[in-house]
């Protein structure tokens, strides 16, 4: 589902990765672990073309990432960052924003589905009326997740999405992202999250090493 083939990443003359390869099959749950600044978040950003690679190739859902495919890949992938940009004034407008675009215009969710998913993510029922500027970072991450689930996305890139959550909200997020049909590439230092993944990859010195046993 996601293939990194001998990729190298350089940012401001600093080489973060040198010819690394990993392969996520459909339904895999990968977590990247390592020191701050080791390039974990950069690898996620490269997957959707937000940062360039200097060598190698990235394939997502059978498509090689390029200028001509990046829009389609972004439409297939949900990126949940540490501080999501919701792109709207109110939470309701943010949730419905993708459905104002031509691709999704005829698939706008009804109120019952929005409320049902919001409840599953432990979001308060009155949050839809709130300004996006007045909600917490953890709520923004769950709103971004809510939006992706409404779009029926099954490929998720998640960057420390439980770091600002209480235990109950963390369990709610994990229940959604660890479903069998979801392909997940994540960054996390949370032992519970790491333990739930079937592939644990250490990031150090520009290399990726999967932990076994």
Image: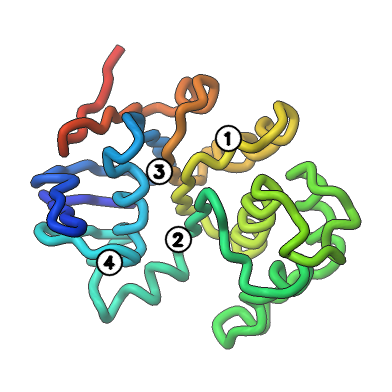
Residue located at (54% from left, 21% from top):
192
Q: Quadrant of residue 187?
A: top left
Give how far across and how far down residue 122 sits, in percent: 79, 42
Residue at the image position 58 percent from the left and 87 percent from the top: 102
Q: Earlier in the sequence, mark 1 or mark 3?
A: 1
Rendered image: mark on residue 163:
1
> Disc 3 versus disc 2: distance between alpha carbons?
11 Å
**Going 44% across and 50% down the picture, which residue do you hit?**
157
Q: Report helix, strand or loop for mark 3.
A: strand
The reply to whether dot 2 and dot 4 touch (C-beta < 8 Å) is no
Select label 2 or label 4 by which is in front: 2
The earlier-in-sequence mark between 4 and 1 is 4
Q: How is the image coloured?
A: rainbow
Check the image and report above or below for 68 versus 132.
below
Nearer to us: label 1 or label 2: 1
- Please name the residue that numbered disc 4 is placed on: 63
Q: Which of the 4 quarters of the picture holds residue 100? A: bottom right
For marks 2 and 4, the one nearer the N-term is 4
Task: Look at the numbered disc 1 and give the secondary structure of its residue.
Answer: loop
Alpha carbons under labels 4 and 1: distance apart? 32 Å
Where does the image place residue 35, in percent across and percent down from the top left?
A: 32, 30
Label 1: few (<14), some (14–19) or many (≥20) C-alpha neighbours in 10 Å: some
The residue that mark 3 highlights is: 185
Q: Which residue is mark 2?
A: 77
Residue 175, x across and y down, in percent: 64, 35
Q: CA distance from mark 1 to mark 3?
A: 16 Å
**Mark 4 or mark 1, which is nearer to you?**
1
């Amino acid at each position: 589902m996601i293939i990194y083939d001998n990729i190298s990443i350089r940012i401001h003359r600093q080489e973060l990765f040198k010819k690394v390869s990993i392969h996520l099959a459909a339904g895999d749950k990968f977590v990247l672990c390592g020191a701050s600044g080791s390039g974990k978040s950069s690898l996620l950003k490269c997957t959707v073309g937000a940062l360039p690679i200097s060598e190698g190739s990235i394939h997502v859902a059978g498509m090689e990432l390029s200028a001509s495919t990046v829009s389609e890949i972004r439409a297939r992938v949900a990126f949940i960052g540490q501080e999501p940009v919701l792109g709207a004034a109110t939470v309701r407008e943010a949730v419905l924003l993708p459905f104002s675009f031509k691709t999704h215009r005829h698939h706008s969710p009804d109120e019952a589905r929005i409320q049902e998913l919001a409840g599953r993510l432990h979001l308060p029922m009155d949050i839809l009326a709130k300004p996006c500027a007045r909600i917490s970072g953890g709520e923004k991450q769950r709103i971004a997740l809510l939006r992706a689930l409404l779009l029926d996305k099954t490929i998720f890139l998640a960057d420390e999405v439980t770091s600002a959550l209480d235990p109950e909200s963390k369990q709610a997020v994990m229940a959604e992202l660890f479903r069998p049909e979801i392909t997940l590439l994540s960054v996390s230092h949370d032992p519970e999250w790491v333990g739930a993944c079937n592939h644990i990859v250490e990031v150090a010195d520009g290399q990726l090493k999967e932990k076994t046993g």
